[in-house]
Amino acid sequence: MKLIVGLGNPGDKFINTRHNIGFEVVDALARKLGEGGKGKGESWEHREKFKAEIIKIDYNLKPTTYNLILAKPKTFMNLSGMAVSQIASYYKIKPDEIIVIHDELDLPLGHIKIRVGGSDAEKFVVEQFLPNEKSKVKAMIKRAVKAVEAILELGVKKAQSQYNDKGAG
């Protein structure tokens, strides 16, 4: 079982901001994996005991089927670790089976980075995307979804070589 967490902040103030890109990526991932026979899942469910919305998806990657839990903590960013910890503990998910998706101010818009371990700095942008950034954001979300699939299919190292430092292309 793997846990894929998209980080963001609850509330209308944060919709369509860089800060909530993690939410957007797991939403896109849930839509993609839940369609076309590649995955089978339910709809998002608010779980108060986790302070998060979760969705369970069976991702068929022959010969293996991965049981995935996608999560969107409904706490503010600085408290999201508590939700992740509670979900991981409840489902007995080891730290190396957790993928966390979040914004990274140090990367130019359109770039993604796969790494093992946490962030060195907690910097967040709460401004809405500009109209001329929308297409870049949409492309970045698609690339991030493909990167998560690559992690599941190929492992972290191969996914890193495919997606790190590749820019928005």
Image (spheres, grey):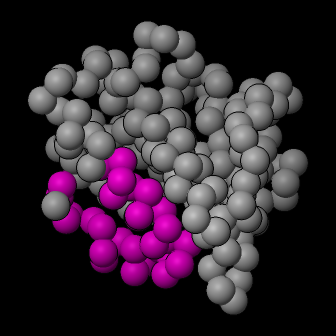
Residue 85 part of the magenta-drawn span: no
The residue depicted at 28 percent of the width and 17 percent of the height is 127
**77 sits left or right of 89 in the view:** left
Question: Residue furthest toward the front?
Answer: 36
Q: Image height check: is 61 above or below 142?
A: below
**Viewer-proximal residue among 115 and 135:** 135
Camera-side residue of 126 and 168: 168
Q: Answer whether residue 43 is visible to the viewer in this image.
A: yes
Which residue occupies 29% across, 49% down?
A: 140
The part of the chain drawn in magenta is: 140-168
Q: How many marks?
A: 0
Residue 85 seen in this snapshot: no
From this view, report whether residue 125 is shown above or below residue 73. above
Which residue appears farthest toward the bottom when viewing the image? 63
Residue 36 rendering spot, x and y as whole percentages: 58, 65
Residue 42 image offset from top left, x and y in percent: 75, 47
20 vs 60, left or right, is: left
* Residue lying furthest left: 132
Of the 4 image quadrants, the one containing the N terminus is bottom right
Q: Position of residue 168 (x, y in %)?
A: 18, 55
Residue at horizontal 72%, vertical 76%?
65
Q: Position of residue 17 (x, y in %)?
A: 35, 24
Residue at image location 44% in from the left, 30% down from the top: 20
Residue 62 falls in image quadrant:
bottom right
Quadrant (top left, top right, bottom left, bottom right) of the C terminus: bottom left
Tell whether 53 sits left or right of 12: right
Towards the viewer: 58 or 36: 36
Residue 166: quadrant of the picture: bottom left
| Main SS of residues in magenta | helix
**Nearer to us in this view, 4 or 38:** 38
Q: Is residue 150 magenta?
A: yes
